[in-house]
C-alpha cells in the first residue's frame, strides 16, 4: 500500500518534491479542512479508532479510515467478473452492482454508477488539486474518487479501492 505522498515523491523527481515541500503548509491546511468536514458528518455505523483498526486490519484501515490508496493492479477485485454486489468492507452496505463494473485500464475497480443511497461525495482538495472523493454513506469509509471520463450512460468513472470493498456473488 502506498500513500498519496509516496506517489508524489516517487513519480515526480526532486524539482516537484521541492515544490511539494513549499506547498506543504497549504496541503496540510487543506487536509485539515477535509478532515474537519469528514468529522462533522454523522454516520449510522461508528467505531472508535482502535475498534476500526481491529475490525479492518492494517491495509483496509489505511484505505477506509485514513483515505489511503492501494497500489494500482493490486486488487483481486479488478479481475472479478461474476454477477453480484460489491459491498463496503467497513459495514457491508451494498455499494455497486457488478452490472455497472467496467475495465477502465487504470488499475482500480471502476463502475459507472453506484447503487441508490449507497455513497456520498465530498470535495477533496489534498495535494493542490480538487477531486470528488467518494465514501460509504453509512460508515464514512473512503472508497476512492469519481471522475467524469466514464462510459455511457452516466459518463462517470467511480474509481474505487478494492480494499474498501468485498464482493458478494449472487446466490445460485
Image (cartoon, rainbow, N blue to C red):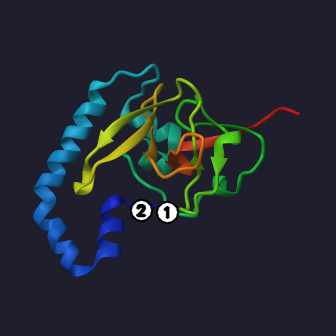
Relative to 73, residue 141 above or below: above
As helix, strand or loop, the secondary structure at mark 2 comes to loop
Q: Measured from the top left, where is residue 54 in percent x and y?
A: 48, 39
Q: Measured from the top left, where is residue 12 in percent x and y?
A: 29, 75
In this view, the residue in front, 148 or 39, is 148
Q: Is residue 163 left or right of residue 148?
A: right
Residue lying furthest front: 152
Residue shown at the point (59%, 52%) measured from the top left: 109
Residue occupied by mark 2: 2
Q: Name which quarter of the figure residue 127 lies in.
A: bottom left
Residue shown at the point (22%, 56%) measured from the top left: 128
Q: Is residue 5 left or right of residue 96?
A: left
Q: Is residue 120 left or right of residue 109?
A: left
Badges 2 and 1: C-beta atoms under 8 Å apart? yes
Numbered mark located on residue 112 in the image: none
Mark 2: few/some/many CA within 10 Å (<14, 14-19, 20+): some
Residue lying furthest right: 172
Q: Measured from the top left, where is residue 48 in percent x and y?
A: 38, 30
Residue occupied by mark 1: 71
Residue lying furthest bottom: 14
Q: Measured from the top left, where is residue 76 in percent x and y?
A: 66, 56
In this view, the residue in front, 117 or 37, is 117
As helix, strand or loop, the secondary structure at mark 1 comes to loop
From mark 2 to mark 1, how far is it between C-alphas?
A: 6 Å
Name which of mark 2 and mark 1 comes first in the sequence.
2
Image quarter (top left, top right, bottom left or bottom right) of the C terminus: top right
Residue shown at the point (38%, 47%) measured from the top left: 67
Count how many numbered circles sit on residues in the image.
2
Mark 1: few/some/many CA within 10 Å (<14, 14-19, 20+): some
Amino acid at each position: 500500500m502506498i500513500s498519496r505522498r509516496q506517489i508524489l515523491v516517487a513519480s515526480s523527481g526532486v524539482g516537484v518534491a521541492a515544490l511539494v515541500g513549499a506547498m506543504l503548509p497549504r496541503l496540510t491546511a487543506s487536509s485539515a479542512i477535509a478532515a474537519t468536514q469528514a468529522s462533522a458528518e454523522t454516520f449510522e455505523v461508528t467505531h472508535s479508532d482502535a475498534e476500526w483498526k481491529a475490525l479492518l486490519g492494517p491495509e483496509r484501515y489505511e484505505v477506509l479510515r485514513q483515505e489511503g490508496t492501494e497500489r494500482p493492479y493490486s486488487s483481486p477485485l479488478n479481475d472479478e467478473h461474476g454477477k453480484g454486489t460489491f459491498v463496503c468492507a467497513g459495514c457491508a452496505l451494498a455499494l455497486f452492482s457488478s452490472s455497472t463494473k467496467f475495465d477502465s485500464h487504470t488499475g482500480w475497480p471502476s463502475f459507472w454508477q453506484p447503487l441508490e443511497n449507497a455513497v456520498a461525495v465530498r470535495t477533496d482538495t489534498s495535494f493542490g488539486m480538487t477531486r470528488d472523493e467518494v465514501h460509504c454513506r453509512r460508515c464514512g469509509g473512503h472508497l476512492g474518487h469519481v471522475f467524469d471520463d466514464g462510459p455511457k450512460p452516466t459518463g462517470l468513472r467511480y474509481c474505487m479501492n478494492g480494499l474498501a470493498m468485498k464482493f458478494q456473488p449472487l446466490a445460485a
